[in-house]
Each structure stands twice: as structure tokens, then as C-alpha cells.
Image (cartoon, helix red, strand yellow):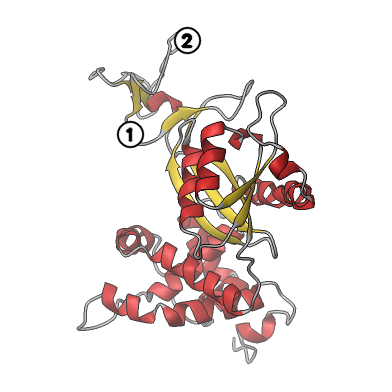
Amino acid sequence: MFSYISPEARVPKDHPLRPIQIMVDNALFDLAPLFKEMYSHTGRPSIPPEQILRALLLQIFYSIRSERILVEQLEYNLLFRWFVGLSMDDEVWNHSVFSKNRDRLIEHDVATKFFETIRHQAERADLLSNEHFTVDGTLIEAWASMKSFRPKDDQDPPTGGGRNSEVDFKGEKRKNDTHQSTTDPEARLLKKGKGKEAKLCFMGHALMENRSGLVVDSRLTQATGTAERSAALEMIEDVPGVKQITLGADRGYDIVSFVKELRRLRATPHVAQKTKGTAIDKRTTRHAGYQTSLKIRKRVEEIFGWMKTT
């Protein structure tokens, strides 16, 4: 059978991936010198890193739960082939390609540089505010089971049940000081609030500008009770310029030490007030911009609601 219609012609002109592809093309063009540095000077790898990154973007956009399924989709999904840059006849690589290249991508901090190139595109289009920002954090579940969270001084693994051994930890007090995951030692046990279950997790943080609702900075940290505020201060300190800015945040950031440090960094704390013991006074609340920042903060919560499902 022969087909004279290319994958490009089969993708609707108004498909959401078309403008995304243009942004990705420009970003990968800017990163070409980095890709050249990452690999041997005697030749390029059999699988271009540009295609690997495009495939990983599809995995995020479409919430594909594993790289095996992603490769399977690339076999027969014409939309995915078009976005990645594969023709109808191109052979799809094995799923192990992602594992083999992941360390190289992490070592050269490719994800951060890719994010920065996309952000620079928004800056050139005058879409970013350099005065008004909002911050929030969320729990990112670790790929470690609660069964792996064992006492640090326990050298005897559970027996029986094969690879998925039964573990009875009923009545056992488990704390980060005394316990650690055997499969992901950096993950910590934390719960987001009262009445919520504790999970092995990390914390994700995002700084958003308020004009267009675009993320301009992010962090991934260990899950601690102070991680959200510490990451927020780091991101605010990295905001270019020396003029006064504003930072919106939920009431979890309404802490005296945090508000004081924000003012030192020339950032007005547009933080939601706690019912009792608030650190936000009328110097801030009397301005109309304070109420505006509280409304815009809901955009950040929507972003993290999407992150939790991917």
C-alpha cells in the first residue's frame, strides 16, 4: 500500500500542537550547540536528542504513564510521529533509549536550559511581567512504596511474598529522623495538611508572573515544612532587576520571618492573611493590588492541579 499524504497534511491546521511545535523548534535550534557538546565529536548518536525531547514532551502533554507505552504510541500514532519528526516509514527506537540518555540529559541540565529558552521566547514577545509574581508549592509523589520506608538501622529486609513482600507496620511510629526509603533515600514522608494521608514525596515549586500567567521559575526540593518558603525566597532572589516587585502566595506563607525576608529582597508580600497571628499589615492590605494578587493566585493552584495528574 502507498500513501501520498504526509503526516503533516493529516494534522489539522488549528491543532494545539502546531504552535507548540514552532516554539519547540526554536528552542531546539538554540540548544544545538549544547547537543553537539554532549555527544562525541566524531559523529552524532543514532537517535537525535531532539527527537527524544519531543517524545518526552508528548509523554507530559498526554499523561502517558510509561516510556514503553510512549514508544508503542509512536509506532502507530500519526500525530505523535509528526510532532517527534518521524516519517511514516521511520523505525521507532527501543524504550531503553530513554534510560540510556537520561543521565546525559541530567548531567548537562538540558531540562532547565530548554525551559529557559522557552521563557526567553515569551520575554521577546513581551508576555512576561517583571513586577508582579505569584508562588506556590505542591507535593510530588516519589516512585517509592510505603513498604520501602524502613528503620535506618534495620539491615534485615522483609521475607516472603517474592518481590512484593508483606510488611506489617500497624502501630509503628515512622518518622523521617528514624526511617528512610530503601529505594529512594531522598524521598521524605510528609502530608499536605490536617486529615491528609502522609506520602513519600518531594516538593515542587513554581513562580508565575501575573500578566499572562506563565511560569518563569521552578524548583524541586525535599519535602520539609519550610521548603515552600525557602524555595520562594531563592526564586525571588533570582528575579532580575533591583526595583520593587510584589509576590502573591497562600496563607501558608504568612510567617513573620518569611515576610521580613521578602521585604529585605524588595518584594511586597501579597500573602493571604491567616485568621490569627498574621504578619501582613495595612501597609500591604490597603492597596488595591493586594486583592488583585489574591485573585490571580488561583491560576497557580490550577497549574499544580494539572501537575498532580501528569
Instruction: Tell me where residue 141 appears, x and y as whole percent.
Output: 50, 38
Q: Residue furthest left?
A: 42
Q: Where's residue 208, x and y in %?
A: 61, 56
Q: Residue furthest top?
A: 171
Q: What secondary structure is found at the residue carrying circle 1?
A: loop
Q: Which residue is denoted by mark 2 in the rendering?
A: 170
Question: Quick one: quadrant of the N terminus?
Answer: bottom right
- Name the residue that disc number 1 marks: 185
Give the residue type at disc 1.
Answer: Pro
Q: Residues within 10 Å of mark 2 (few under 14, many from 20)?
A: few
Q: Position of residue 291 (x, y in %)?
A: 78, 47
Q: CA distance from mark 2 to mark 1?
A: 22 Å
Residue beneath the point at 63% across and 79% down:
125
Closer to the camera in the image, 115 or 165: 115
Taking depth in this image into account, of 217 and 26 the one nearest to the observer is 217
- Amino acid type of the residue that numbered disc 2 sits on in the rendered structure: Lys
